[in-house]
Image (tube, rainbow, N blue to C red):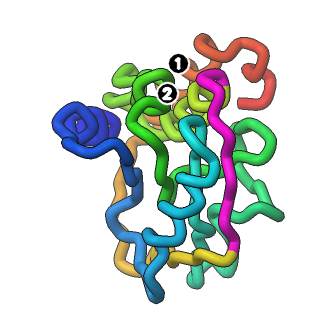
């Protein structure tokens, strides 16, 4: 969804962005606390809620676990539910639309670009959302992952051995 994320950001009126998977379930309010953390961190803040998948019995985003196959910067997580300032988004360049015709790796690329833009990431384990898998119908072609893996390896040659 790199194109819709970028279009939404381009037309957003506020100074703070929330980037999320649309299927996230908020059992308790978390956005207010995320905003307070973002204000505490300042301009370079990047706040992530923890994201748990009950069906797989694993964390998709948590400060104590990183099970991503493709590396991301230490202390970072993927944006199952993230919040950042518009200025940080702009310095990072939003999502790279080269990934739009494939599958995967755009999230990892975004984390690295935020890191290089000076992001200070905080994963709030106490602010938990759920990432359900039941009923998911994503049918990415295998060649889509190969395509995007190649883009990621070209962009981040030092990480190419990990992908």
Q: Is residue 151 left or right of residue 14?
A: right
The residue positioned 63% from the left and 48% from the top of the image is 41
The one nearer the camera, 42 or 115, is 42
Residue 121 image offset from top left, x and y in percent:
67, 46
Q: Distance between the residues labelled 2 and 1?
A: 5 Å
The one nearer the camera, 53 or 147, is 53
* Quarter containing the N terminus: top left
Vertical position of residue 132 compared to residue 41: above or below: below
- Identify the mark at residue 151; answer none if there is no mark: 1
- The residue to which callout 2 is attached is 148
Residue 121 lies in the magenta stretch: yes
Q: In this view, does 16 lie to the left or right of 131?
A: left
The reply to whether discs 2 and 1 touch (Cβ–Cβ < 8 Å) is yes
Magenta-drawn segment: 116-125
- Residue 143 in view of the camera: no
Q: In this view, does 14 lie to the left or right of 153?
A: left
Residue 22 image offset from top left, x and y in percent:
33, 63
């Amino acid at each position: 969804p790199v194109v819709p994320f970028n279009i939404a950001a381009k037309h957003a009126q506020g100074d703070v962005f929330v980037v999320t998977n649309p299927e996230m379930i908020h059992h308790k309010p978390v956005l207010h606390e995320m905003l307070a953390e973002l204000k505490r961190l300042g301009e370079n803040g990047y706040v992530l809620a923890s994201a748990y998948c009950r069906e797989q019995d694993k964390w998709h985003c948590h400060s104590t676990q990183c099970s991503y196959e493709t590396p991301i910067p230490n202390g970072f997580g993927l944006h199952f539910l993230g919040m950042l300032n518009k200025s940080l988004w702009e310095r990072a360049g939003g999502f790279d639309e080269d990934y739009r015709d494939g599958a995967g790796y755009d999230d990892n690329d975004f984390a690295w670009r935020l890191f290089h833009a000076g992001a200070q990431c905080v994963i709030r384990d106490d602010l938990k959302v759920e990432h359900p898998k039941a009923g998911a119908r994503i049918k990415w072609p295998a060649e889509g992952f190969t395509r995007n893996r190649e883009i990621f390896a070209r962009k981040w040659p030092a990480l190419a051995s990990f992908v």
